[in-house]
Image: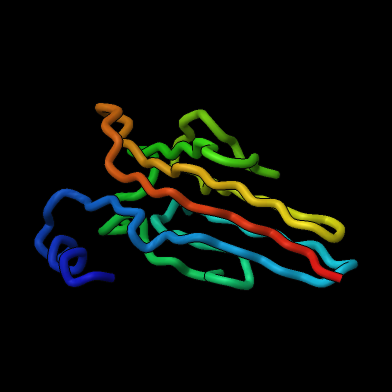
Amino acid sequence: MSILKSFIATMGVAPVVSLADAGDVSDENTFPGDAVASIQLESDGDIFALGIINGGDQGDWITPRSAAGGNYEARWTNTSGTLSSGTAGSWQALSSTRTWAVSQSGVGSKTCTGDLEIRRTADTVVVATKSITLTAQVFF
């Protein structure tokens, strides 16, 4: 957590929403295995990625995390490629965990780049945006 986020959390100031900690995610595997790369905004405020490269906890999308939930919505908009799973192009409440992913079965690769946005539900103001690339690749 950044110093600014810690300060705001302890001072009782309005929640800070940020996707600064989220990053590109890649997964690789050898045939006959599958590869899956995903980014997840969890309903508890956590950002989690699944992938061999940059996988794991990627920080928080909101500080304090206790402010997470139904007051915010997220949207993924494809800018290149397509998702294998997850909803693109429509706002979804963050009262539930949301996941966007690409997967590759068989030798080859799949990539999708998109803009991930978070907005407040009360006034529909977008408070965070980040371009993220998901890549899944299977080798011989």
- Comparing 26 with 96, the one in front is 26
Give the quadrant of residue 12. Answer: bottom left
Point out the image quarter for the C terminus: bottom right
Q: Where 11 falls versus 116 (above or below)?
A: below
Residue 124 placement (x, y as % from top left): 30, 28
Q: Is residue 66 left or right of residue 38?
A: left
The picture places residue 40, in percent across and down from the top left corner, at 52, 54
Q: Position of residue 97 (x, y in %)?
A: 52, 48
Asked which quadrant contains residue 5, the reply is: bottom left
The scheme the figure's colours follow is rainbow
Query: Number of callouts in the render?
Result: 0
Q: Residue at x 56, y 34 (%)?
A: 88
Question: Is 72 on the left or on the right of 37, as rendered?
Answer: left
Residue 92 drawn above or below residue 44: above
Q: Residue at x 33, y 37 (%)?
A: 119
Q: Position of residue 77 (x, y in %)?
A: 50, 36
74 with respect to 13 (left or right): right
Q: Which residue: 59% across, 55% down?
A: 134
Residue at image location 57% in from the left, 41% down from the top: 80
- Nearer to us in this view, 60 or 82: 82
Q: Is residue 134 above or below residue 78?
A: below
